[in-house]
Amino acid sequence: MSIKFYNALRFPAHRMFEFLDRARVEATEAYAQELIKWLKKQDITPDADGHLPEEVTRETLPARISSQAERLGRWEIYITDLYAYAIPLDRVAYNSAKEILGLAWAEDFQYWSDASRPENFTGAKWATRAHIWKEVLFGGNPSSHHLVYRALDFGTLEEAMVCVVSARIIPFPDPANPK
């Protein structure tokens, strides 16, 4: 069986809550930035009757945000007695992994079994990493736990949307001042 984790982290298990908090913050920020870029590219000019395109109306935009966000910011995490191993499952988690790797307690723990090792690894070090990943994934450690964590914070996304609307990126009509 082939193992391919081109982007994976390892950190002390006692740092799990710090990781989850940081993953949430980073994923939410990354998704909010993606959302703003997407909105800036949309044709948000009201038609002759003053209606906005369907995908950017006040009624449909929250559903779009929620449906996309449910699939983004996900991590697969394996917890052992000493370490936790986290694998980003999508582009938002992947981008937040770059920020998390900047923390002193997180280390890059990539591994792939069907290709040559990176130049900066000795054969023994790569073999040790292979053994660790096989034990984490398939070992009989009864204290191991596996979970999938969705890191996006919907409350923060709603706050981001308020900022987007108030910045007039989307020209929502003011209900108090209809034209």
Image (spheres, helix red, strand yellow):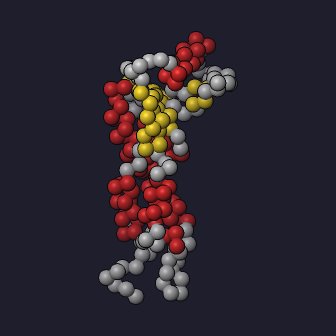
Q: Is residue 112 left or right of residue 68?
A: right
Q: Quadrant of residue 82?
A: top left
42 w.r.t. 123: above or below: below
Q: Position of residue 59 (x, y in %)?
A: 43, 71
Q: Position of residue 102 (x, y in %)?
A: 43, 34
Residue closer to the observer: 98 or 19 = 19
Task: Please report the residue visible at 42 percent of the width from the left and 23 percent of the height from the top.
Answer: 144
33 w.r.t. 131: above or below: below
Task: Locate the N terminus and report the quarter of the image it occupies.
Answer: top right
61 w.r.t. 27: above or below: below
Task: Locate the C terminus and report the quarter of the image it occupies.
Answer: bottom left
Q: Is residue 8 left or right of residue 162?
A: right
Task: Please report the residue visible at 37 percent of the width from the left and 46 percent of the height from the top.
Answer: 25
Task: Please report the residue visible at 40 percent of the width from the left and 69 percent of the height from the top.
Answer: 165
Residue with the most extreme top position: 124
Q: Is residue 18 left or right of residue 172?
A: left
In this orientation, does residue 101 appear?
Answer: no
Residue closer to the observer: 154 or 103 = 154
Q: Position of residue 100 (x, y in %)?
A: 43, 36
In this orientation, does residue 8 appear?
Answer: yes
Q: Position of residue 38 (x, y in %)?
A: 53, 61
Give the total of numbered labels: 0
Task: Please report the residue visible at 61 percent of the width from the left and 27 percent of the height from the top.
Answer: 3
